[in-house]
Amino acid sequence: MPTYVDIELFGRTFNVRETYISSTILVLLLIAITIIIRVFFISRFTLDKPKPFQVVVEYILETLDKFTKGAAGHLGSKLSPYILALGFFIITNGWVELFGIRTPLSDLSVTAALALITFFLINYYGFRAKGVRGRLASYLKPNPIMAPFKFISDMILPVSLSCRMFGNLMGGYIVMGLLYEALIGLVKKWVVSVVVAAALPGIFAMYFTIFHAAVQFYIFSVLSLTFIGEATD
Amino acid sequence: MNLALLGAGIAVLTGLGTGLGMGYATGKAAEAVGRQPEASGKINSILLIGLALSESCAIYGLVIAILLIFAK
């Protein structure tokens, strides 16, 4: 399933997967766009008589603040930069499927990295808000018999978060690949015209690529905010 | 006949319960909207969150089937 590429750097040969390369290129592109916007546009924001671009940016940030405060409680304003960075990463990596490149998010390593970041944040804020003894005592809260089940369901959190996004996006990638192959076979046998074969994947890609990536980002961010808010309550 | 392929076929049977549960939840949501049409926005967002979370039970079976087929 995964395809490997050999890269020669500093005199040695590395054997890397193709999704790591596309993910790195996309992140470098995002960093370049961010630096350009910061240097040229944001330094010209004014307090009175704003231009349309400033109004749009401020509206997006306000909506994000309300969303994180509603889901995570009083820690919401500290978590909204993390949610915005996660949103840009997931949306860019998900919508690159429209150009024919395999999405980096259909690789279990990439989604596992995102889920581990969320797991680290949950434990960091939980230990800082309650202390080590308070957090371990919260496992015994309603009933001491439930302690192993609560502990297991806390440890299984990164597995569930990563497998959900990986399964959804891998399913979409496989279905789009099968659709392209079937249309190529049908066009060769003169069953379907070329115009239909060029337009039909676009209709399916609206659901499988665009909608799946957006919904998975929404579910991932809502779950991370809920678990962080629950650990610091 | 490879036993891993048979296991992959059995693992995808998790879609059965998932389909039943999601259909039942959608029916309840439609009934609630019919009872009070002004709250249809909030019911819509609650329904989408519930469907995406319960779909992950079927996705677990798919991940296990993919692991069984493509990994030795």
Image: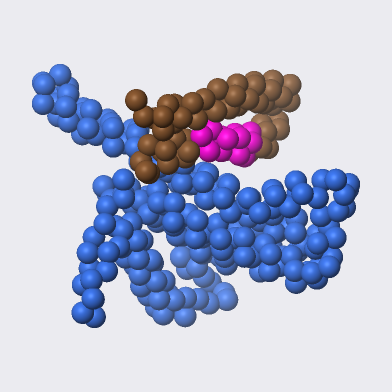
Chain colours: A blue, B brown
Q: Position of residue A219 (x, y in %)?
A: 58, 47
In the picture, measured across the screen, residue A192 lies left or right of residue A65, that is left
Q: Position of residue A141 (x, y in %)?
A: 87, 52
Query: Overall secondary structure of the magenta stretch?
Result: helix
Q: Is residue B59 visible?
A: no
Q: Is residue B50 magenta?
A: yes
In the picture, measured across the screen, residue A15 lies left or right of residue A77, that is left
Give the magenta-colored segment's residue range.
Answer: B47-61
In the picture, measured across the screen, residue A76 lies left or right of residue A34, that is right
In the picture, measured across the screen, residue A222 lies left or right of residue A95, that is right
Closest to the observer: A142 or A225? A142
Residue at 42 percent across and 41 percent down: it is B67
> Residue A207 appears in which quarter of the rendering?
top left
The quarter of the picture where the N terminus of chain A appears is top left
Closest to the observer: A41 or A182? A182
Judge whether A159 appears above or below A136 on screen.
above
Residue at 62 percent across and 65 percent down: it is A120
Q: Is residue B6 magenta?
A: no
Q: Is residue B65 visible?
A: yes
